């Protein structure tokens, strides 16, 4: 079996953008004749969940497991998205900045280079490198390893290098250096893949004259496995809404829209039970109190992709609220792909871009025109369909281009073309 070295600073159990994508690609490659040798960040102790998909992979972590015993769920969910690990000592709780430790994701690059050299020599038979970015560090390392060991590289760019997603992913490189690194990737002669057409077009426009259309292929995100069973229709309308990297002002507007919806006329007197999933639990709790909607809104955080899938499974409709930053326009949140894979009615609020396009292709709910009243009106439209029993009639299905067989067939051809004959 041919071996591919996987440089994956974002990898489960972490919930950083791209982690589920890297895991699904690594988990599927053995079926196509390639064994991933993964350099991943530290695991947790105790582990969160069994990862049956790791069969066929060789996984080497850049450090020992992080002690997460006794950590509260909300704190763990924040940590897995790049937040600080809460201190357990009295001093750490009183002076958290003084006693905080570097996040394991930010220290990945310190050990990954040494480990990669070791694995290339010890494993034998490694014929190529898969690398995902951002962050920028693995991309730069892949270029260095390619030159040193004469190995081809498959670059998987899931966003512009080092967007402002979380502090742990910051590279410390200047914007000009990051643009130069992107240009090196796009002109390297090696294959480049992205998850969305919007991101491909972003790179082509940004590096106009340097990158050609055929230099970049689109490999969408897919869902490997989903919870079994189906959710029964309850006596209360139950939307589950995921807040995806939205700004504080946008979060305030969203909760005010929820309040307006809940205070509007519900024709038959049934109550709405709304679940809002966010890593920003403290701010969300304050806003729920401010708008006096505690009784109707349940706040949740998610520490694993399986938890997100279970929450989506219990929903009458799944919503995603996207932020206004540019990288939000270029990506499809992984939970939205999961919800469509579960054949749930979906909607997207926020910036126009790849997420809204994906929802529309999946027969998701939409209101043309937008405006400040759009969130309330969209929830009202979902409620009316739910009350009439037609909400699930949208026959939500994964777009043909995102079907696993097609996605991994395309990926297998790209890798086969990359490897030496």
Image (cartoon, grey):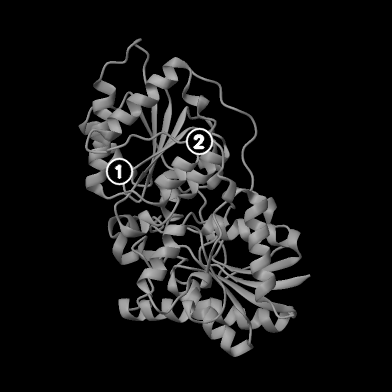
How would you rate the neighbour count of disc 1 (Cα within 10 Å): few for under 14, some for 14-19, many for 20 or more? few
Q: Is residue 63 above or below residue 121?
A: above
Q: Is residue 172 left or right of residue 6?
A: left
Q: Which of 56 and 49 is in front in this view?
A: 56
How would you rate the neighbour count of disc 2 (Cα within 10 Å): few for under 14, some for 14-19, many for 20 or more? many
Q: Quadrant of residue 163?
A: bottom left
Q: SS at mark 1?
A: helix
User: Depth-wise, is mark 2 or mark 1 nearer the camera?
Assistant: 2
**Circle 1 residue:** 282
Q: In this view, does 49 lie to the left or right of 108?
A: right
Q: In which quarter of the image is residue 44?
A: bottom right
Asked if one can make out residue 301 in the rendered structure from this viewpoint, the answer is yes
Identified at 41% across, 33% down, the residue is: 365
Check residue 333 in the rendering and tell me which mark sits there, or answer none: none
Name the spot of residue 137 as percent of width and height, x first.
46, 75
**Circle 2 residue:** 312
Is the C-beta separation of discs 2 and 1 under 8 Å? no
- The Cα atoms of the two marked residues, 2 and 1, are separated by 22 Å
Name the spot of residue 361 as percent of width and height, x first.
48, 42
Q: Nearer the viewer, residue 40 or 66?
A: 40
Asked if one can make out residue 12 in the rendered structure from this viewpoint, the answer is no
Identified at 72% across, 67% down, the residue is: 35
Q: Which of marks 2 and 1 is nearer the N terminus?
A: 1
Name the spot of residue 253 as percent of width and height, x first.
23, 39
Q: Which of 261 and 347 is in front in this view?
A: 347
Q: In this view, does 80 lie above or below 308?
A: below
Q: In this view, does 72 lie above or below 4?
A: above
């Amino acid at each position: 079996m041919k071996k591919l070295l996987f440089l994956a600073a974002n990898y489960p159990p972490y919930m950083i953008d791209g982690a589920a994508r890297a895991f699904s690609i690594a988990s599927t490659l053995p079926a196509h004749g390639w064994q991933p040798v993964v350099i991943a960040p530290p695991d947790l102790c105790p582990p969160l969940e069994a990862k049956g998909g790791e069969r066929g992979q060789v996984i080497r972590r850049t450090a020992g497991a992080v002690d997460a015993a006794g950590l509260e769920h909300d704190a763990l969910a924040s940590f897995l998205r790049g937040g600080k690990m809460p201190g357990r000592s009295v001093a750490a709780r009183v002076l958290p900045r003084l006693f905080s430790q570097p996040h394991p994701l930010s220290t990945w690059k310190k050990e990954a280079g040494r480990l990669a050299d070791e694995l290339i020599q010890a494993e034998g038979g490694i014929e190529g490198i898969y690398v995902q970015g951002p962050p920028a560090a693995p991309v730069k390392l892949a270029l260095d390893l390619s030159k040193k060991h004469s190995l081809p590289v498959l670059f998987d760019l899931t966003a512009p290098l080092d967007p402002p997603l979380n502090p742990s992913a910051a590279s410390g490189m200047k914007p000009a250096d990051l643009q130069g690194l992107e240009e090196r990737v796009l002109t390297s002669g090696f294959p480049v893949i992205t998850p969305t057409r919007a991101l491909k077009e972003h790179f082509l426009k940004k590096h106009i004259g340097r990158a050609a259309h055929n230099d970049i292929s689109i490999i969408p995100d897919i869902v490997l496995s989903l919870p079994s069973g189906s959710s029964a229709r309850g006596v209360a309308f139950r939307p589950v809404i995921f807040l995806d990297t939205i700004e504080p002002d946008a979060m305030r507007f969203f909760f005010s829209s929820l309040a307006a919806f809940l205070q509007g006329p519900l024709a038959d007197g049934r109550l709405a039970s709304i679940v809002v999933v966010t890593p920003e639990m403290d701010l969300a709790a304050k806003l729920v109190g401010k708008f006096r909607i505690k009784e109707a809104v349940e706040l949740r955080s998610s520490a694993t992709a399986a938890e997100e899938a279970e929450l989506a499974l219990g929903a009458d409709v799944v919503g995603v609220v996207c932020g206004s930053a540019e990288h939000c326009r270029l990506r499809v949140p992984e939970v939205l792909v999961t919800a469509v894979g579960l054949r749930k009615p979906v909607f997207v609020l926020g910036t126009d871009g790849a997420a809204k396009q994906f929802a529309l292709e999946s027969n998701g709910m939409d209101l043309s025109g937008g405006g400040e009243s759009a969130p309330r009106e969209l929830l009202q439209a979902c409620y009316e369909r739910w009350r009439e029993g037609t909400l699930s009639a949208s026959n939500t299905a994964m777009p043909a281009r995102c079907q696993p067989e097609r996605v991994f067939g395309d990926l297998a051809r790209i890798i086969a073309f990359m490897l030496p004959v």
